[in-house]
Image (cartoon, rainbow, N blue to C red):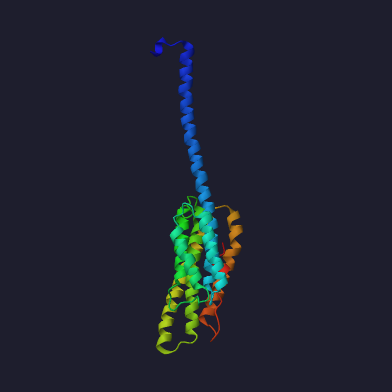
């Protein structure tokens, strides 16, 4: 059948076959670009959402939560869910976190023992969900992978340990006898957790710097030094808390990014 075609039609057929291959390959490339664009958009949305979660978590480390601040934090989480939560599967967790934030208003933030407050636990669960669903934790580039590990995993863990340590230090300042011995044991456990967390933070910083250009080190070295200094000062004050006094939590330094 093809042999009966004229030369012009044979050339046209060859041209159409070549064109179909070009169109097919172009479609694949365009689809890959759209996937990359969608990946980046989800990362940007996740980054903005995580900033709102961070700002809601930090005030929970204060000795007494402020009702107005807690209400503003809850409203900010609800707004972040509406604006950035599409495709994050975070609606239920964000609703729970916002509700617990409102309940925390006007109540002491520190809880007995080493367990974090329910609001803090809910906030960390929401943070992990957003980090996973926005692809931030799955970043294929080593420098940004370790940076995201710091923001999503290491700093929240450090903030939780610092808050629990502060609560125990205040209890130790007035405890006596058997209760003091029990609290001292818990305090030493938290000291070990803080050592492990700071070791992980140092490792992530080192690997991020090794995998990136010197520009990343220039941007993050200052905050890393401030973090190390703030944690050292906090640990010194937590070991010798004044009776009836308070132990300051290094809020921004504990989550510098």
Residue extending farthest to the left is 1
Horizontal and vertical percent for residue 59?
Answer: 54, 70
Residue at image x 49%, y 62%? 203
Q: Where is residue 190, by image quadrant?
A: bottom left
Q: Please, is residue 107 above or below residue 54 in the view?
A: below
Instruction: Give the position of the C terminus as an image quadrant.
Output: bottom right
Residue at image x 46%, y 14%? 10
Q: Nearer the viewer, residue 17 or 257?
A: 17
Horizontal and vertical percent for residue 191?
Answer: 46, 75
Horizontal and vertical percent for residue 30?
Answer: 50, 37
Residue at image x 47%, y 67%? 99
Can residue 250 be seen in this snapshot? no
Q: Please, is residue 102 above or below residue 112 in the view?
A: above
Residue at image x 44%, y 70%? 118
Counting every numbered tag in the picture gives 0
Instruction: Give the position of the N terminus as an image quadrant.
Output: top left
Can residue 30 be seen in this snapshot? yes
Q: Where is residue 132, by image quadrant?
A: bottom left
Q: Please, is residue 239 above or below residue 250 in the view?
A: below
Horizontal and vertical percent for residue 162?
Answer: 50, 73
Q: Please, is residue 115 above or below residue 50 in the view?
A: below
């Amino acid at each position: 059948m093809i042999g009966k075609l004229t030369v012009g039609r044979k050339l046209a057929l060859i041209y159409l076959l070549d064109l179909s291959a070009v169109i097919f390959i172009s479609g694949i490339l365009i689809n890959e670009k759209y996937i990359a664009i969608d990946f980046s958009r989800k990362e940007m949305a996740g980054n903005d959402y995580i900033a709102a979660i961070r700002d809601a978590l930090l005030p929970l480390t204060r000795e007494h939560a402020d009702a107005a601040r807690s209400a503003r934090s809850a409203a900010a989480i609800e707004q972040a869910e509406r604006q950035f939560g599409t495709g994050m599967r975070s609606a239920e967790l964000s609703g729970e976190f916002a509700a617990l934030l409102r309940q925390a208003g006007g109540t002491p933030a520190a809880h007995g023992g080493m367990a974090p407050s329910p609001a803090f636990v809910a906030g960390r669960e929401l943070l992990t969900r957003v980090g996973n669903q926005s692809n931030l934790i799955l970043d294929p580039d080593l420098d940004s992978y370790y940076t995201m590990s710091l923001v999503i995993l290491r700093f929240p863990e450090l903030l939780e340990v610092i808050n629990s340590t502060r609560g125990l230090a205040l209890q130790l300042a007035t405890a006596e006898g058997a209760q003091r011995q029990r609290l001292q044991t818990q305090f030493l456990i938290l000291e070990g957790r803080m050592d492990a967390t700071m070791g992980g933070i140092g490792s992530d910083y080192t690997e991020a710097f090794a995998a990136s250009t010197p520009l990343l080190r220039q941007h993050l070295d200052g905050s890393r030094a401030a973090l190390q200094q703030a944690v050292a000062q906090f640990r010194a004050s937590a070991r010798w808390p004044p009776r009836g006094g308070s132990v300051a939590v290094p809020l921004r330094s504990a989550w510098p990014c």
